[in-house]
Every structure is written in structure tokens, then in C-alpha cells.
Amino acid sequence: MTQTNDKKIALVTGASRGLGAAMAETLGSTGWHVVALGRTMGALEELDDRIKAKGGTATLAAMDITKDDAIRHLCRDIHDRWGHLDLWVHTAIHAPPMSPADHIALKDWDKCTAINIRATGVLIPMIAPLLTAAPSRATALFINDAAARGKFMGAYGASKAAQIALAQAWQLETARIGARVMIEEARPMPTATRARFYPGENRDTLTPCLQEAERLLRALAD
């Protein structure tokens, strides 16, 4: 893996695009070494170029977040190379087509539960020891989404709510010991996920992803 000297190490899951890519780019440009996980190598390579252009460093991990063995191997690599993580930012999400609750396709349910719920449940116990091993208290950041609540968003809304419920339980369990778990509400951004829900929306009125990433990362210091 990349030589990183004594930089803090951040893992961003869902780093190929949208807020995840913006979080990775912002971290990489502010002195962190970023382990960027996403499904699309081309998008990760473009992210790497942007990080390098700002003087940062990244390790790219192109993999399917629902593949347990791949995630296990990545966590082992992180442990062997750095021994810990200082930050985990979880932005990986699946947003299926909008649909009435009584017309949700089974394949959409399956993909939502696999990515939004099960993968999160697999990631937490694999990543928690890496966070606990950090020299100072590490942080896990989850992103809530107000857009997940409403009609025709049953599959996305239910699976996102389950993901956040899991994060909230972990947050309470680690209030005094272990990683600091944070759950932040993201402002509306011009992402592909939001465009699926609001196709006619004026994207110029939304918060740019990089600007929102900077705001969310400032919250880590509070």
C-alpha cells in the first residue's frame, strides 16, 4: 500500500461518487491518507487524480461492499499496513426506483437490504477493532437523509432507517468507550441519488458536495 508516513488514516465507503467522493477528496487534501472504497475503479482513479492534484494520498479499493470476503481482506490489509483507522465515513447506499409500497420489486428490496442494512451490519464489527486500535479516540460517521422519508420511497426509506437505527445503537453502546459514533443529517446535494427522487429539481439551488463535505468534517472537530 501507499507510504503515508504519520498521516491519519480514513476509510471512506461509497467513495466512487457524490458525497463519498467529496468526503474522500476533502480528507485527502487536508492531510489525511484516504482508503477509498467503491465499486467503480474508473471513478476511484479520477478521485485519486483529484486528491493527488491537491497534494494528498489515497489507496483505492475497488470492490463490492456486499462481498464479505473482500471486506474482510481489506480490513486485514489496513491492519497489516497501519494497525488502525482514525476515521470511518460510511456513505455507501443504494436508492432504488421510486415505487408505491405495494409495487416494490423484490429485486429492489433485496438490493436495498444487502447494501443499506446487511453490509452495514457486516462492516461495523470488522471495522470497530481498527477504530478502537487508534492512538486517540477514532470516529465513525454515518449520514442520515431526510429525503428517505416520504411517499414512494418505501424501500429506500425503510432500509435507510434500519441502517441509522443500527448506527444509533452502536452510538449508545460506545458513548463511554470505543469509537465515537456520529450521525449527521446531510443537506440536499446534486447527487445521482437525489436526482432519482427529484428529477426536475433545479440542481443550482442545492449545496455542492464538496461544500457539504467540508461542513460535515468540521462537525468532527466540535
Image (cartoon, rainbow, N blue to C red):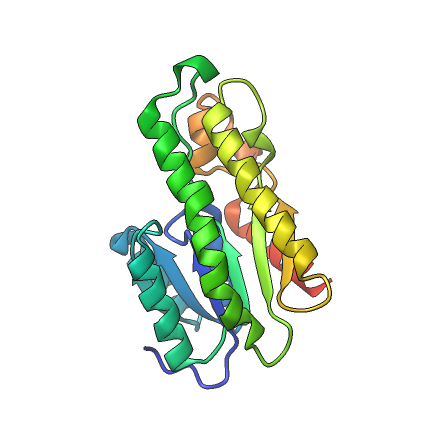
Residue 146 point in image, percent of width and height:
61, 33
- How many numbered discs? 0
Residue 48 point in image, percent of width and height:
35, 63
* Residue 139 horizontal side relative to residue 79, left or right: right
- Give the position of the C terminus as an image quadrant: bottom right
Q: Residue furthest left?
A: 42
Residue 205 point in image, percent of width and height:
57, 32
Residue drawn where x is 52% and y is 51% of the image: 210
Occupied quadrant, residue 74: bottom left
Residue drawn where x is 49% and y is 67% of the image: 10
Q: Where 57 sits versus 45, above or below? A: below
Q: Where 116 sits versus 70, above or below? A: above
* Residue 193 horizontal side relative to residue 213, left or right: left
**Towards the viewer: 187 or 9:** 9
Q: Where 159 sits versus 197, above or below? A: below
* Residue 87 horizontal side relative to residue 215, left or right: left
Residue 15 point in image, percent of width and height:
41, 54
Res 25 seen here: no
**Towards the viewer: 61 or 7:** 61
Occupied quadrant, residue 192: top left
**Towards the viewer: 43 or 181:** 181
Residue drawn where x is 52% and y is 76% of the image: 8
Res 141 seen here: yes
* Residue 58 horizontal side relative to residue 144, left or right: left
- Give the position of the N terminus as an image quadrant: bottom left
Residue drawn where x is 50% and y is 72% of the image: 130
